[in-house]
Image: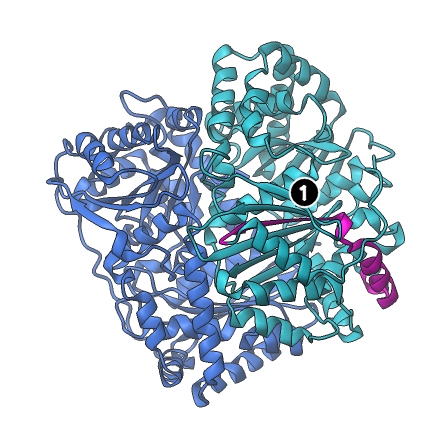
Amino acid sequence: MWHRRILLVTILLLAIHRPTADAAQVQEFVLDNGLKVLLLEDHKSPAVTFQVWYRVGGRNEKDGKSGLAHFLEHMMFKGTPTTGPEEYSRIIAKNGGRSNAFTSSDVTVYFATMSREKIGIELELEADRMTNALLGETYFEAEKKVIQEERRLRTEDNPAAALGEVANAVAFMIHPYRRPVVGWMEDIQNLTRQDLVDFYKLYYEPNNAFIVVCGDFSSDDILAKIRAAFGKIPRGAEPPKVLAQELEQRGERRVIVKKEAELPVTLLFYHAPNLKSPDSFALDLLSVVLAGGRSSRLYHELVYQKRLVRNVDADYSGVAIDPMGFSITAQLLPGVEPTNLERELDRLVEKVKSELISDRELQKAKNQIEAAFVFAQDSVFGQAMKVGSYEAAGGWKQMEGYLDGIRKVTRDDIRRVARQYLKTDTRTVGTLIPTKAQ
Amino acid sequence: MKQVCLSLWVFLALVRGPVSAEAGMTAKRTVLNNGMVLLTSEQRALPMVSIELLIEAGSRYEAADQAGLANLTSKLLIYGTKQRTAVQISDTLDFIGASLEAGSGQDTTSVSMTVLKKDLTTGLELLADVLTQSTFPQAEIDRQKQAIIASIRAAEEEPGIVAAKAFAAALFPDSPYGRPVEGSEASVKALQQKSLRDFFARNYRPNRSIIAVVGDVSEQEIAKALNGAFRAWAKGEPSGQALVPANVGESKVLRINKDLTQANIVLGHNGVARGNPDYYALQVMNYVLGGGGFSSRVMDSIRNERGLAYSVYTYFAAEKSHGAFEFIMQTKNETALEAIRIATEEMRRMREQPVAEQELSDAKDYLIGSFPLRFDTNRKVAGFLSQVEYFELGLDYPDRYADLIRKVTREDVQRVAKQYLQPERLITVIVGNLKKIGEK
């Protein structure tokens, strides 16, 4: 399946608090126009991933304009004065490359993976559309329909995603993380081409972007090419900052979504800090203790022993510009009442707050993270994504101390962060109740 | 469950990597003492090892009234052996941060493991244990049956899966290839412990197995370790001849009503087996038609020009004994019939008019140029090698691939389009809100 121009929902981006790249190898350069370049040489295979990250996403949209960043991402493929509509993809493909783009709450990213001989082509095309995108009127209405189909596919007809969207809108009242990245259907309908043009002018500037290159290249060579292609683009005005801060939640919030589905879904979302907090390491480990592997607490108890759910997941979304959260999601087995599951979830969450986990349990979680750290380096693309995600959220140097930070976490830390963040009063509970078509 | 190691990148469906010799993917092939075929590629860059085991133990080897047997057998591998309980197995794996997953297809069952080099011995012991000493305890059978039945229910929520199942059943009636691998709720409930043990004893045999090992280990080391770990695994009966579906379903339209905003559409018909000499010409033709992402004709006409769909693509699925052509898209209920009309027009155009030189060369350039990106990680190399062996492509396949594509001509493309695209004989499956979709 071809996932081009995909929408990466925030939740996905959150799952990447696992740096793969050895931060020591990343080299940073900043061009005169403010464009930052992060290079990570890896000669395992003769391919290069080139990514342009714009520091703009759903987070930067205004009420009534949700989906704007993502719409713009789609329209970025409609050509420049020198490249025809959709020609970008064809050029990359006929040069043996694969290209794609995605939008999250925090960022919009364009990328291609190609051989080292061909990567210069991608670089030129990205420099061109950083400043010359036409966002042609001719293609605007058709692309709007495409995006509405995308929303139907991903959210309207996907019960779990529909629940996540509503729960998110309730968990956040003030911060723009409350809006879906793809946009509400009516908002998408109301967006105009002028909205796109204004947004593009405001945010697509070299000083509001950075480049990540990972793979088989020589740094001197690629840097020279980047300077030649991007260096001539003038620095733009500083885009407006997003200053919104979520107020502290005072009391549990509950949402219910009724939709044609087979199995109920339960979702617990707790507000939690991002990677700027020293607690982020313990929160990462806590998610593994709860749901990392078949021997984890929630999986063992709820999937294996008590047989209440089909699957259960715990995600800590630390790699985000602003604080997001810690969530637990489960799809129930047929016949299980959501209230029964909630009671069990509460019991297990209380347990990790009241009793220390065992030494072996802590060691197991650390081993899992360390092994994952090695496995993740298998993919050059994955490494580039990690560097970019960290850079966007708080600076790539935050990756440097990651494993050390994990190693230092104690059993007391786990209990402390569980107590501090997994509070009933600061959570949102979402339930999907399946209905049947007549 | 959270797979810590993972790779949300899989979601991005993106790949990157080496061409064989150039990137040092040099693979070796050996047959172990017990008849298992071993493929290795030494990759020393990272202290990890990826293993992909392919066993001819898919659902085609189960009786029609035992649908789901192969799948249940594979799921139960990690739930109890003579030496280890299910809990011990999962705890051991998690403690070393390794992954071990098993799942069945129609022809084969695959078992994949990724483990740190320092834990390779532990990993191989576990792997050998589950493949040779599984006991299928009744309590675990009951658990897994419940889980599988739930997943059959959950799949009903996914209109794409509902459509795919209906299509397969219509295309290959009365064949294991038309049956879902997981079986039905009723067939799964009825499966007995004895059947599982018999299926395991008969089909999980080294002479029906291919193992690919890629990573921080030499061929010599791994062959020695495997000969040791699997020394008690005795040969069984061979898998026998490929099974050709007896019947191919007639053209028809299947409508399935669900309260959805989009119609999920599968159009298609019979295809070709992987060994068909026209396979490569079909790959080129399909790239132009609907396999080429944003370079394909259907992406242009259905998505870009008309905004009817977000995702639209075609492919030829080619198995050992058979294959299928499928045209897949989703569009709002109201435009389903229009989208189907355009889809069939595109198939006709492909048959009736020769492709442009530019289209042909773009397709070839992409297929050849991006080939190395298909096996860019150790894990993908392991999967690739096991497939190369299973389909008998030869270890020189990566080196021959460019020539196989290069020699495809415009005439070949039109010939295979005429021969293998049959817009008049489509099986059409539409899952959506039928009232809004309307009648043809």
Tell me if residue A91 comes above or below residue B411 in the rendering.
Answer: below
Q: Quadrant of the N terminus of chain A?
A: top right
Tell me if residue B155 comes above or below residue B403 in the rendering.
Answer: below
The secondary element bearing badge 1 is classed as strand
Residue B145, position as x, y percentages in the image: 76, 66
- Give the mark count: 1
Q: Is residue B390 left or right of residue A59?
A: right
Q: Which residues are magenta?
A: B187-216
Tell me if residue A312 comes above or below residue A225 in the rendering.
Answer: below
Q: Residue at x 61, y 35 (%)?
A: B395
Secondary structure character of the magenta stretch overall: helix
The answer to whether residue A106 shows anywhere in this view is no
Residue B18, position as x, y percentages in the image: 46, 37
Chain B: give its colour.
cyan
Q: Is residue B430 magenta?
A: no
Amino acid type of disc 1? Val
Local packing at callout 1 (Cα closer than 10 Å; few below 14, some 14-19, many 20+) is many
Q: Is residue A174 left or right of residue B294?
A: left
Q: Residue at x 73, y 52 (%)?
A: B33
Q: Nearer the viewer, residue A59 or A325?
A: A325
Q: Residue at x 52, y 39 (%)?
A: B26
Q: Which residue is mark 1?
A: B431
Q: Which chain is blue?
A: A
